[in-house]
Image (tube, coloured by chain):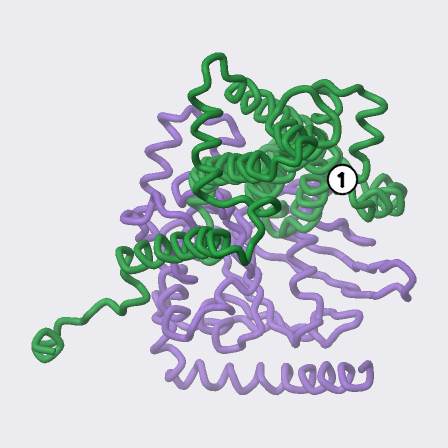
Amino acid sequence: MTQSAIGVTRVPLSERAGVIRSLQILVMLGFVGTWEILSQVGVLDKFYYSRPTLIVPTIAEWITQPGTTLFRDIGVTLLETVLGFAIGTLAGVATGYAFARNHLLGAAFDPLFSMFNAIPRLVLAPVFILAFGIGLASKVALGVTLVYFIVFFATFTAVRDVDPAFIDNVRILGARRRDVTFQVLLPAALSAIVASLRTSAGFAFAGAVVAEYIGSNEGVGRRIAVAEAFFDSTGVFSGIVLIAMLALALDGLLQLVESRFSRWKPRRER
Amino acid sequence: MTEAVISLHGVSKVFHPPRQRPYVALEGIDLDIQAGRFVSVVGPSGCGKSTLLALVSGLLPATSGQIVLSGRPVSAVRSDVGFIFQRDALLPWRTVRENVALPLRFRGVPATVAGSQVTEWIARVGLSGFADNYPHELSGGMRKRAQLAQSLVNDPPVLLMDEPFSALDVQTRNLMENELLELWGASRKTVLFITHDLEEAIALSDELVVMTAGPAGTIKARYPIDLPRPRSVTEIRFSPAFVALYERAWNDLRDEVLRSYQRSLSAS
């Protein structure tokens, strides 16, 4: 009160970083605590839902076990994610760009692409496992199909909807065809790719994990499948928690990349 | 009499939108503009005045007639003109400095030479403190200044301006108009200026061209403007000569504005 009386503006509670952070931790603890308590008092069946005090030691054991394969599993899953993401993005950018620049091509392929895009692509996982085997290729293939369409449509719309004033302006300023491509069209596409980066990387990760779960001999998804086969719900949840952690780390990393590439955008569009 | 820098003879432009009737935007345009003159074109919306600039710059091909710019017929996009667009045309992912440097970069000017020219032009339009800002960080007026610097850094003899200040508030607009006159006075480029604002057109120009309502827009009247220079656009509007000119030109323009309005009503 004395502070506001002398005119010092107080930062509202809802905008203080410390307050927000404490609340976030409180919510997390509340969630984990409720899970634990409900499990302890028997509302949640431990057999199906496990409990945090069982999951944490399991993950710790995975990490510390002598000769643990955990890091190899994580490495495999991340490699599949990166490959699926990279191949899907390259293919999506190349075709999205070509289709946006060539109306006839875009029109001809439109129905086919709409059809493929309408298929929930996770159902393709068994197809890829049959076709490419239980190794790396089938996981990457699923990731590619997921990433491809996101990046394709993002690039396509971005390049097609480039403000014609930008193109007219640089042409008058002396741009050749190559300059228009590198100064206007590709930066517009890059901006769309960066905007879709986190979504598409998330999908590449999901594709890798799901394909591992369905048929594989290594990877994080494989761990869940094995635990499930032994009715080991703690193992399943440990795998899920691990995946969540990895996904968060990946997303955090990409957020950094995104902000690095978005400095030119107005804040509300970032 | 000096040679015409911009000359149009019997120029017309017909658009062929898919699945619609062809649209005659311009018809029978004859216009000669001498070197160093500031000429404004006014007309109601839809009269084809912006199309006229697109034809002169080569962004659009004329359907018939001949356009000669700086002694050469216009057959492709001309990069020996400056063009200020109505909309923001600065690349949003480039800073002011990078945007202004574009025309030099496209021409392969060495970075060291380009750098000093760019810095000089950024200073001339008063954006020295904002050279490393992105366009979205600037106000509308500042973005227009940056566009001016971008278009002039290469020193083109002709400047084409398509309602450049119409999106600005009145005060900023008057400021920009005065600064444009200053820049023009120092360089004496040939300017073809498109606007729907009669006051702006008279205050800035040596000659006023009034167009008829579209479709098939054409030149209705031309007025020489002999008001003394240097001018201040904010003060010249009160001079009796300005008012007299305004009244004469407005008589012409009013009929066209009404016609344009009635056509838009019957079309909808």
In this rendered view, identify the residue nearer to me: A219 or A43.
Answer: A43
Q: Which chain is green?
A: A
Determine the chain carrying the residue at label 1: A
Q: x and y percent of residue B249 in the render?
A: 58, 81
Residue A229 lies left or right of residue B115; in this view the side is right
Classed neighbour count for the residue bearing mark 1: other residues with Cα under 10 Å, few (<14), some (14–19), many (≥20) = some
Residue located 71% across and 84% down the image? B261
Q: Answer above or below: position of B122 versus A141.
A: below
Q: x and y percent of residue A55 in the render?
A: 48, 38
Q: Answer above or below: position of A180 versus B227.
A: above
Residue A176 seen anywhere in this rendered image of the structure? no
Residue B105 seen anywhere in this rendered image of the structure? yes
Q: x and y percent of residue A152 in the render?
A: 72, 40
Identify the element where label 1 is drawn.
helix
Q: Colour of chain B?
A: purple
Q: Answer above or below: position of B129 versus B231.
A: above
Residue B187 lies left or right of residue A233; in this view the side is left
Residue located 82% across and 45% down the image? A119
Where residue B141 sits, quadrant-wise, is: bottom left
Q: x and y percent of residue B196 in the render?
A: 58, 73
Residue located 58% across and 65% down the image? B194
Residue position marked by numbered label 1 in the rendering: A122
